[in-house]
Amino acid sequence: VCVSLPAPSNVSISSFNMEHTLSFLPGPETPSNTHFTVEILKQLHLRKNLWRSVAGCSELTAGQTCNLTRAFKDPLNQYRARVQAFTPIQTSNWTVSERFQPLSDTVLGPPDVSVSGCGNCLLLQLRVPTTWGLQQHQQLKDLYRQLVFHVQRTRDGARFRLTLPYKEENVITYLQPGVEYCVTVSVTSLFNSNSVASKPYCAFTSPPQARSSLYVVFGLLAAFCALGFLLIGLVVYSGQMSLELLKQRLPRTLV
């Protein structure tokens, strides 16, 4: 086999929530019938040069990626990956990735979040995101030790920050009743500083008084005031009429 194909470029490993993906670009002027194969190496085996192929990634085409989630079984170990282009009669040199450690290099996404009011507090229901496999889900769950909450009051933008241990149910207390707050959540870990915050989740601490009910209250107050003025007017008018009648009858009685 002749070594004459352009070597692949931009070989890199990305990871989100312990799901690892290798991507690459074909070298310049790579023939359209070229395929690509992927191998990985554990840090422990660097001196022995024990590269091994990755299942499902031995005949990739340009634009395809390689899922390394199952291949990187030990989250504490460091790995490298390499890619080679080949045709039936030609191969390229291998292109090697940077070192990758699943535990520290994965990006930790936010938990699944739901928020509801509880009077002068917010109740947050949290859940570790669903992942590709049970092993990855357990690894991710082990990383979810602490959470960072950014709380913002919608009315004026006042905000504060809380760091709490991970629990499936968290309560943020000492908030104003009937006021809307928005919360973003992210994960913090001793072994991993790569995290993505959630979108803002907003809720009222307690149901605010509806504008329609305020209009009803003001309307009733206005009606009662009008009725009061009407009653007072009737009393005054009745008093004046009684006085006039009394004046008209008084001289006849005296005669």
Image (tube, rainbow, N blue to C red):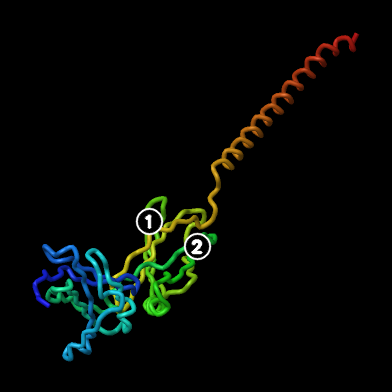
Label 2 element class:
loop
Q: Which residue lies furthest to the bottom in this view?
A: 48
Q: In this view, does 75 lie to the left or right of 217?
A: left
Rendered view: 10 above or below 38: above
Residue 105: give its label: none
The quarter of the picture where residue 1 lies is bottom left
Q: How far apart are marks 2 and 1 (CA)?
A: 16 Å
**Where does the image place residue 201, in percent across and percent down from the top left?**
43, 58
At label 2, counting other C-alpha atoms closer than 10 Å, the crowd grade (few under 14, some 14-19, many 20 or more) is many
The residue positioned 39% from the left and 62% from the top of the image is: 184
Q: In this view, does 41 lie to the left or right of 127?
A: left
Label 1 element class:
loop
The residue pinned by badge 1 equals: 158
Nearest the eye: 149 or 200: 200
The quarter of the picture where residue 234 lies is top right
Which quarter of the figure is the C terminus placed in? top right
The residue positioned 37% from the left and 69% from the top of the image is: 148
**Where does the image place residue 210, in percent across and percent down from the top left?**
55, 45
- Which residue type does callout 2 highlight? Cys
Q: Is disc 2 in contact with disc 1, using a CB cutoff of under 8 Å?
A: no
- Which residue type does callout 1 highlight? Ala
Q: Residue furthest front?
A: 89
The residue positioned 15% from the left and 68% from the top of the image is: 9
Nearest the eye: 107 or 51: 51
**Where does the image place residue 52, in percent across and percent down from the top left?**
24, 84
Rendered view: 199 above or below 55: above
Q: Is residue 109 left or right of residue 34?
A: right
Nearest the eye: 166 or 176: 166
**Where does the image place residue 64, in percent across and percent down from the top left?**
26, 66
* Mark earlier in primary sequence (2, 1): 2
The quarter of the picture where residue 219 lies is top right
The residue pinned by badge 2 equals: 121
